[in-house]
Image (tube, rainbow, N blue to C red):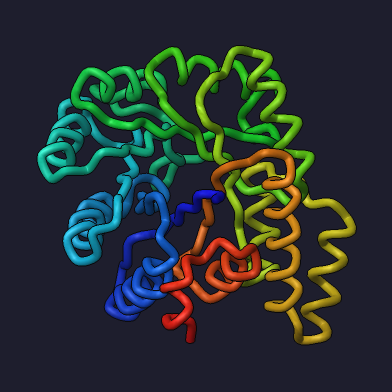
Amino acid sequence: MTAISFEFFPPKSLAASFRLWDTVHTLAPLAPEFVSVTYGAGGTTRELTHEAVREIGKMTGLNVAAHLTCVDATRDETLAIARDYAAAGVKRIVALRGDPADGQSTFSPHADGFANSCELISALADVGDFDITVGAYPDPHPEAASADADIDWLKRKVDAGATSAITQFFFEADTFLRFRDRAAAAGVDIPVLPGILPVENWHSTRNFAARCGAAVPNHIAEGFERAERDNRLDLFATVQATDLCTDLTEEGVEHLHFYTLNRPGLTRDVVHALGLAPPMSLEHVA
């Protein structure tokens, strides 16, 4: 059975809080291996992330992974948070460099902070018995000198103590499969989980893809644009994500990680279309 996991983000308002809990309660019955809670851009939701991690774990019993970044915090502050997580029973940390802090166009480390994700990973490996998950980029990261540089960074993360990786989202299975093969050839021997984004809003998704370097094939863009014009975006998005996941699992992928954007409907539908929902969860489908 293919494993699944979900990413949530912490709420910044009362309405967003209701949306998060609706997302959690809709997707929890699908029996994810873990769920993760992000930081906002520039670390802006640090305290909200901590609170969401604690509450989701306490209220649902799910295995909750907490994101930690290098942005706008000292080493001592970051490691204190990690120790708090360990004391609370958190077993998995998603360790990332993080996006630039507010008002900055490029990442600049805190004077007393971690300079990059590898430093953070190495320190976390010394702090507790964490599963340390890191980011990976099937399409070149916007700051990468080359596609090979992304592989080199992933190998450095493994050498620092990473135990798994989650990729940025992508639109074609071959993009991930080529990356997986190149990473393995370079000595990356940890599980690399493909990041799947069921598209809720095509305009926002395309803009985000441009910012993070995710290539958008012409036939994918044309399909989403036609679906928007025909008022059948949800149907097309479900089919597109389901087909992508099917192609991946047929090539031996054993775990799919879904970026939910705190909107659970499409993710739930894709998981059911793939036949990955436990029978007991069917009664929870709206």
Q: Residue at x 73, y 35 (%)?
A: 177
185 in relation to 3, above or below: above
Relative depth, front residue between 45 and 217: 217
Identify which residue, 273 or 198, lies in the foreground.
273
Give coordinates of residue 102: x percent, y percent. Answer: 39, 47
Place residue 222 in its image quadrant. bottom right
Q: Position of residue 243 (x, y in %)?
A: 75, 59
Horizontal side of 256 relative to 14 (left or right) equals right
Residue 283 visible in the shown view: yes
Residue 122, image quadrant: top left
**x and y percentages locating residue 240 in the rendered image:** 75, 64
Q: Does residue 34 appear to the left or right of 218 in the view shown? A: left
Residue 152: give x, y in percent of width and height: 59, 16
Examine the rendering and report whether any part of residue 263 can be seen.
no
Image position of 144 (left or right of 134): right
Q: How many marks?
A: 0
Residue at left offset 71%, top offset 25%: 181
Which of these two is toward me, 106 or 242? Answer: 242
Which residue of the protein is positioned furthest toward the front in this rendering?
279
Q: Is residue 104 above or below residue 238?
A: above
Most foreground residue, 1 or 189? 1
Q: Residue at x 38, y 53 (%)?
A: 35
